[in-house]
Image: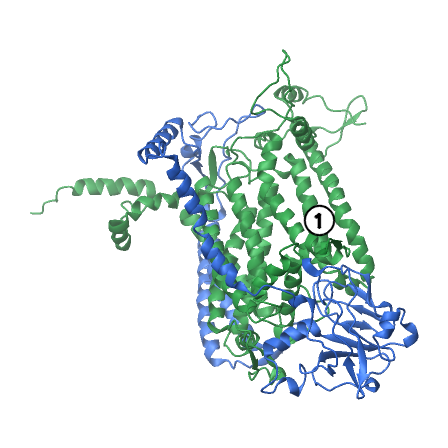
Amino acid sequence: MTTIPQGAHAVRDQSAAATETTADDADPKLPPPVVYLDERFGVAKGFGLFKKVFPDHWSFLLGEIALYSFIVLLLTGIFLTIWFRPSMAEIEYQGSYELMRGLHMSQAFESTLQISFDVRGGMLVRQIHHWGAILFMAAMTAHMLRVFFTGAFRKPRELNWLIGVVLLSLGMIAGMTGYSLPDDLLSGTGLRFTDGAIRSIPLVGTWIEFFVFGGEYPGDMIIARFYMAHILLLPAILLGLISAHMALVVYHKHTQFPGPGRTENNVVGYPLFPVYMAKAGGFFFIVFGVLILMGATMSINQVWLYGPYNPAQVTAGSQPDWYMGWVEGAVRIMPGWESHWGGTTWSWNIFLPFAVLMGIFYTALAVWPFVEAWLTGDKRPHHILDRPRNAPTRTALGVAGMTFYGLMWAGGGNDIIATQFNVSLNAVTYFLRVAVFVGPVIAFIITKRLCLSLQRADRERVLHGSESGIIVRSPAGGYSEPHVPISNDEAFALTQHRQYPPLEETPSHDEHGVKTSDPNKVSGLRARLSAWYTGDDIVKPTRDEIAASHHHEDEPKQLH
Amino acid sequence: MSDDQIAVHEPHAKPTTYVEPGPADRFENPGLPPHRPRRADVDDAAAKRAERQVTTLFGLSILGTLGFIVAYFLVDPNLRASILVIGHVNLYHVILGLTMAISLLGIGLGAVHWAKTLMPDTEIVEERHLQASDQEARDEAAGILSQGYRSAQLHRRPMLLLTAGGALGLFALPMALQVAGGLGPLPGDTLNHTVWRKGMKLLIDPSGTPLTPEMVTQGSVIHVLPEGFAGESSHGEDGPSALEIMEVKATASVLLVRLNPELIQSQKQRDWSVDGIVAYSKICTHVGCPVALYERQTHHLLCPCHQSTFDMTNDCEVIFGPAKRPLPQLPITVEDGYLVAADGFAEPVGPSFWERGE
């Protein structure tokens, strides 16, 4: 006689019920390794993280590309350190690249050639590493622009924006110290520029120069020192800051674009497990794969063509990697200004376009979230992104900044522009000296007008719907085009944004003539700047206007 | 995710973390649009096809990995080939790269395709929470802070805090000083002069041949280093170290050009020359690149780094570009038939610096 063990009924009932709803795996069990870990670290409690939701948008991938190229840089960088020798000691080359046999060169350059020609797959990894650095900087820059134009830097994310600004500037230094290491003619030329640029700093320039280079240029220390910074100091700081950057993204939850169902209080998207693990993890492999393709098929930094460094030689067309190009351009188009006061020399021609320009650029980026909050008086947290048109002055400033950067960048290639397009080098330079100031102003005006026009178009669309493309002739002979009302979803998306009326100046005296002492008072300057910042916004349709326009829906509008 | 889970998040359901939507809201939030199933959600054949595509991509990755390993050992590292359009390549390098790329792209594309076709694509909603703590938590935190502050007796003995702050603020200084102090020698007056001395022969770089005036023909440009720093003499036991040679090349490199003496405009330039042969520092006064491009027709010297242009017939004055000062001239003369320096440079060479004076 068989007996049904106690509890089996319940089990069967449960599984039957489960089959009805979820088809399979009604009673999931943790895999033994996870149980093992849970008993020691309580990992099961953390599995809620797997349900974390990430919103989907292509522009959110830009930061991911930056992160993944950084990981690629770490992996390929480890490979390169195994063979690279950061020494400026001179040796005679006896490796397999025949054209250089017998040449005197530093060990750094010799080991770079060895990695390129004698280590199996070394050339591939070297090229992946260099392309990775170029992509890392490009992705960070694009990511920063996305964050800027969509207002993702606003409260509560201002400090994460600051971390981003530091990452961008450190990334630039990491790249610069990296491409200086091979000690070929091009990288040496870059070092020479760095030396001259440091020397131009007032008061302490020569001291810093001698401290950095360990004496007079070029010395025999700089490669080893840059190597330490490039493989230890900077990656450690970058890694720490990137971790903090990511942790804050997880903590704040990702921003999302406006749309039906999305509010300031939710985040709409797909769960980390399994969707984002597959998408983001897969994307890492795609970024890595594309970088490998680039390393395999596109040659970069062919140091064996430049030869070993010799301070008395230089190649025409010498240029740094792209992210230093705008500084290079500023230095190139700067007029030769130098002042002499009381036995001191002020090299404005280098100090301004190098140290001052970079200082202003990164400071402006760093303070922007706080400046904007000051201009709008906005203290609310924001999780819904701005459409760039809805912040016209910010968008215009961003495009003006991009124009400035782009023109400076073009300046970094003034010789290449001159030779490729057969124009006068001097003319290109004179043009850029004016254009870097005029261009951004024009870009600002055009962008702001475009944004305001788009705002007007949105307003029209909400009030009168979209054009139907159908011309109707009335019995009286008039022609008109009926408009089709837009969907409720779209109307919501077009009107959900908050608008900021310009701040009004707090009167300095109240009605009794007593001086006011309001801690939140608005100064006249701030009120004027605020009016400049938000005063031109096209007011979005009011509820009354919307109701009125819907009322007139049936009456066809007369065409003029 | 089921539909009722989405319905919970209608804007009417005002959670505690609610952020005021602002006075300007014109339309009620319509809520998430209905989910549109993908083809693979409703059509089993499409789902099968998607599965096949994903497994094919993963399979390709496996093949790529194996291909890499095989190629690594079997292909000759020096194998070269001409590929249409691309040109002459090291085939070993390309094969390693392509197999590795297939290995990674197979995984990446497969995973993303899997996620996009077969994993759930119903949007789900997660609540946000205010970052700021509520007043209760803040009060508690303030209490903890205050209690700790008082229990450490800081409220009664302020000197504790002052001295602790001072000590903590200063303790890192010795380490910073140690680093900064050991970094490099102070510049002193190193930058004010080069190795050029009166009577030093002008040697052709790199052969080290001493120059006679006849060797410098009209229109030629010769790269020159001071005696003892070029050619055989620089490589002997008693010769300068590689480091010293580098430093001399970086500061004392000189360009020698023979101009038509009638073209020379200034008396000083003529006095410091020999029959139209002039010697100028090759180190740009801008940031120190070698001024390497000489235009024979115009007698302009151009720095390829930042395009500063110097007029050789006018004592190397700047006629274009970011440099300010002319290239320093090296006074030369003839001794025993050879060209030698009549003196060192009269001013510092290379980029400007604070203490340079004028």
x and y, in percent, of residue A17 in the image: 27, 39
Which quadrant of the structure image shows residue A539? Answer: top right
**Which residue sits furthest left?**
A1
Chain B appears in which tint? Answer: blue
Asked if residue B88 shows in the view, the reply is no
Nearest the eye: B127 or A40 = A40
Question: Which residue has dot 1 on it?
Answer: A404
Position of residue A261 relative to residue B66, above or below, is above
Nearest the eye: A213 or A543 = A213
Position of residue A327 relative to residue B78, above or below, is above
Residue A336 horizontal side relative to residue A142, left or right: right
Asked if residue B295 shows in the view, the reply is yes
Which quadrant of the structure image shows residue A204? Answer: bottom right
x and y, in percent, of residue B192 in the image: 69, 67
In what element is the residue under mark 1?
Answer: helix
Chain identifier for the green-coloured part of the image: A
Amino acid marked by disc 1: Phe
x and y, in percent, of residue A231 in the image: 49, 63
Nearest the eye: B40 or B344 = B344
